[in-house]
Amino acid sequence: MINICHIITNINYGGAQEIIKLLSKDNRVSIVVIAIQKVNESSSIVKFLRKNNVPIYSFFCITDLISALLSIIRADLLHVHLFPAFYIASIIPKKKIFTEHNTENKRRTKKYLWNLEKFIYSNYDCNCCISLATKNKLTLWLREEYLNIEVINNGIDLSEFFISERVLDPLFNRQKFNIAMAARFVEQKDQLTLIKSLLYLPLNFNLILIGNGPLLNNCIDYANKNNLLDRIFFLGWKDDVSLILDTVDIYVQSSNWEGFGLAVVEAMAKGLPVLGSDVCGLSEVIGNKEYLFESGNYYQLSNKIKYIFSSEMAYKQASSFSLKRSRMFSFKKMLEDYFSIYITTISS
């Protein structure tokens, strides 16, 4: 058994955190998680790791510092996620890999950071990108071909997702149609485009938004000014997203950029029709132009939604495509790919 120390900015919720949760299921690997920020014990991911006896330490907590440092020393390999953990861990003199979870970030808009970024990435034995688009964007930014960059697609545990009974109901049985999106309210995710699409949809279409973030109030203000509040449910962050997906009819991921789109795969695995903005990473996951819309184009999005609900056949085709597509992203392949990288890096 090999000892892996995951170092991450926070372990509370998100795609990167879900990946650590799944990687903890590999019985060939013993893991410890070190978070830079405070650990939220109410997070479902934290609860899962605690239940499975995965040690979690935080640099935010003074009493954890010694245990965290000893874990780093004893580890065979460090596996690092997100900024600023990515910068901080780069100086640790250990074998280490970094998982790049996004195609874009604000650092890449600052040309003066290029030399520093090039140095940071080069300090990692391997940089694992969650999609081909993520790799292409990283290579374009660094303008380097010699760095060790691999693509390892994210995956989900398909055994945890079952087709929604609501998806199986005939369309004419439903008086209301529920659209859902689960994401932080930040510039990247662009919930506002989805909210604007409601203006062009019939009144029996409602929107369920799951998540918190700095732009939440902006979205609430827009909905209020445009008389949409009675059609939108702002739920905040929820740990039971899978259960909420059982109550919706379609999932939309309206993102300005996306490294992969784990929430999209989860919705697909429930058999939900899925629409996503046509940005690299997300388009790679969805894999069908018919279910993509131009980023920010709320009118086109509304037309795509209306088409899916225009007939039983259109809805079932979209649902069937989602279900089949989700099978391409099993976490078992992800485990094998990471384990291979671990072994290669440790032995090199």
Image: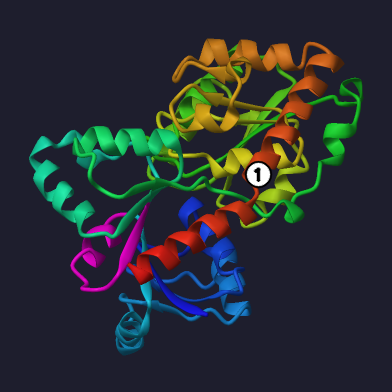
Q: Amino acid at mark 1?
A: Glu
> Is residue 84 a member of the stretch shown in magenta?
yes
**Element at label 1:** helix
x and y percentages locating residue 164 in the rendered image:
82, 41
- Across and down, in percent, residue 257 comes to 40, 32
Let me know if residue 65 is in the magenta part. Answer: no
Residue at 48 percent of width and 63 percent of height: 12
Visible in this render: residue 178? yes
- Picture coordinates of residue 128 (x, y %)? 39, 51
Q: Is residue 105 left or right of residue 43?
A: left
- Which residue is at a point 29% across and 60% down the rendered structure image? 125
Q: Label 1 neighbourhood size at 10 Å, few (<14), some (14-19), many (20+)?
A: many
User: What quarter of the picture does the C terminus occupy?
Assistant: bottom left
Range drawn in magenta = 83-99
**Left-right relation of 325 to 289:** right
Compared to residue 78, the image places residue 288 above or below, namely above
90 sits to left or right of 126? left
In the displayed structure, 65 sits above or below 108; it is below
For label 1, the residue is 266
